[in-house]
Amino acid sequence: MTPILKRPGAMKIVAPIACGIFMFLAWEILCRVTKVPIYLVPKPSDIITTLWTDGPGLLRALGVTLKITFLAFFVAVVVGVTAAFLFVQSKLIEASLFPYAILLQVTPVVAIAPLIIIWFKDPTVALVICATLVALFPIISNTVLGLRSVNPGLLNLFRLNGATRWQTLVRLRIPSALPYFFGGLRISSGLALIGAVVAEFVAGTGGTGAGLAYEILQAGFQINIPRLFAALVLISLTGIMLFLLMAWLAKLSLSHWHESELA
Amino acid sequence: MLMKAEPAMIEPAPVERPTPDADTVLYANRIEKTYPNGTRALDEMSLRVQRGDFISLLGPSGCGKSTLLKMYAGLEAPSHGHLRWAGADAPGKSGLKTAMVFQEATLMPWADVATNVRLPLDLAGVPKAESEPRVQRALEQVGLGKFGKSYPRELSGGMQMRVSIARALATEPDVLLMDEPFGALDEFTRNKLDADLRGLWAQKQGKLTVVFVTHSIHEAVFLSSRVIMMAARPGRIVADLPIDEPVRDEEFRLSARCADHCRDLSIRLLAASGGQLEHD
Ligand SMILES: Nc1ncnc2c1ncn2[C@@H]1O[C@H](COP(=O)(O)OP(=O)(O)OP(=O)(O)O)[C@@H](O)[C@H]1O
Ligand SMILES: [Mg+2]
């Protein structure tokens, strides 16, 4: 029998899981040995218990956060790709607008979130806008880079054969841009989640529309640290899921040709 | 110019005027090329390529062979003088189909071989029913009839190069521009493809014009009906020599006559470069 780690593909799954289990065990043992109070550092077993007992409430909050994340991610992809296409069409458009795209990127979302929340009465709309602003830039910059990173020889070939702008776009620029676009998706999906959480922190909206950030705030006020950790775990898991989903999408559409996805 | 003493070297080109000569496929009249960064790639030169010629552009690295070929393809414009394509001022208006084979295979990695070969036909709006048999025929011509469904990365360098040749052949071109197409291949494959190319050209019986860029004297002699010898710094034409050999087969490749041509060309090439090859 081949050792488990030598089997193709197994290392990528088994190694991180083993590493995780080891860390949780160490955490559990350390907590038990040093007898840290639960309101400072809860044991992993406490967190799991809380996840179970507070499950329904936390899951509802997760649903709200997910909704905002996905809406923001979707809007960021649509707006980002559209902007990228515009930028590539004309140097003038790019020169005039790209600095503002960078401005959006470098302005901390916590700084503008209060404004947006005042401007847009509907909290969902406000939160989606904030998270979109966070997730937008990598899509724009990666897609622009991709649409520009065309093999000059192929570009010559298209020119030589009298390809129209449209044909060049559809048959050359877009396929060339795909690997970059998927790279942007990967970064952006995580940022959309971060944006959704951060914006909710700022907004602090409670009630039925409360997301995981609000749960964390509340748990902090009530010094319910296991619940805080449980919410944190859900956010991390969501982030990992999003990343895997994007990686899978990239593999699905690139695996037959691009180096990054070959075996 | 330097080599006045050499009788066979061409004189500084006489001032030619564009003529509506139906058999002049490519006509360069006192063209020069200076790139925007100031590099003088081609000094003033004139050259008339007749229909059915098989021309080799032979010369050391940096003498402007690729530059001239790109101008023939309409991908670069001369900075002075003018170019005519069968009398027209753009290759697209000449009524002649021009295809180019680049120094690298230049294939779309996301598309399979058949789609790559079909690209120029697709771009020209040829319906699939018509283009697909043409693609298959072109692939068979280069010995890749069974590889239509493969992806470029699954092929060797030589096979990829043949795919790019098939792509040019599928358009059934009147003018075929080739930039060191076999430069990266091993000698066996290269000899084989040279022979195939020459056979293909002969088959077209004067309808196909080829401009072939190469570093290899031997390849130029084996393939062409006319060798244009170029020198660098600045790029210029130093000789225009016909190779009058009706039969080009393995026997000719190994013959003393072929060797003589090669020797003759080598000596001229050395003389033209001032007795030394390129140095900066
Ligand atoms: N796009 C460009 N911009 C500036 N200079 C260029 C460009 N392309 C070529 N050159 C310069 O023009 C000269 C001729 O280049 P060219 O590529 O035509 O040479 P070549 O004869 O094809 O050489 P090789 O056999 O190495 O391919 C060189 O000095 C090169 O540096
Ligand atoms: Mg070259």
Image (cartoon, rainbow, N blue to C red):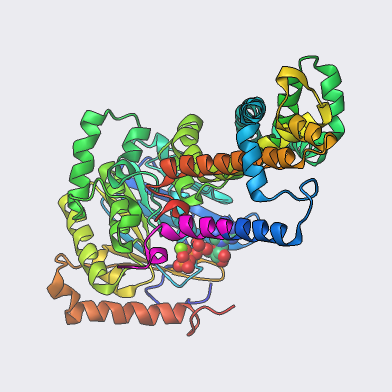
**Image quadrant in which the C terminus of chain B is located:** bottom right
Residue located at (24% from left, 64% from top): B194
Judged from this view, the residue extending furthest toward the top is A121
| Labels in figure, total | 0
Tell me if I can see residue A194 in this picture: yes
Say left or right for A17 vs B85.
right
* Relative image position of residue A52 (x, y in whole percent): 60, 35
Asked whether A18 falls inside the magenta stretch, the response is yes
Give the residues drawn in magenta, as a range.
Answer: A1-21
Looking at the image, residue B3 lies above or below residue A262: below
Residue located at (16% from left, 79% from top): B255
Say left or right for B74 vs B176.
right
Judged by its main secondary structure, the magenta piece is helix
Residue located at (52% from left, 44% from top): A244
Q: Nearer the viewer, residue B25 or B7?
A: B25
* Relative image position of residue A41 (x, y in whole percent): 76, 50
Image quadrant in which you'd find residue B122: top left
Asked whether B73 falls inside the magenta stretch, the response is no
Image quadrant in which you'd find residue B134: top left
Residue located at (39% from left, 45% from top): B110
Q: Nearer the viewer, residue A9 or A46?
A: A46
Q: Nearer the viewer, residue A153 or B252?
A: A153
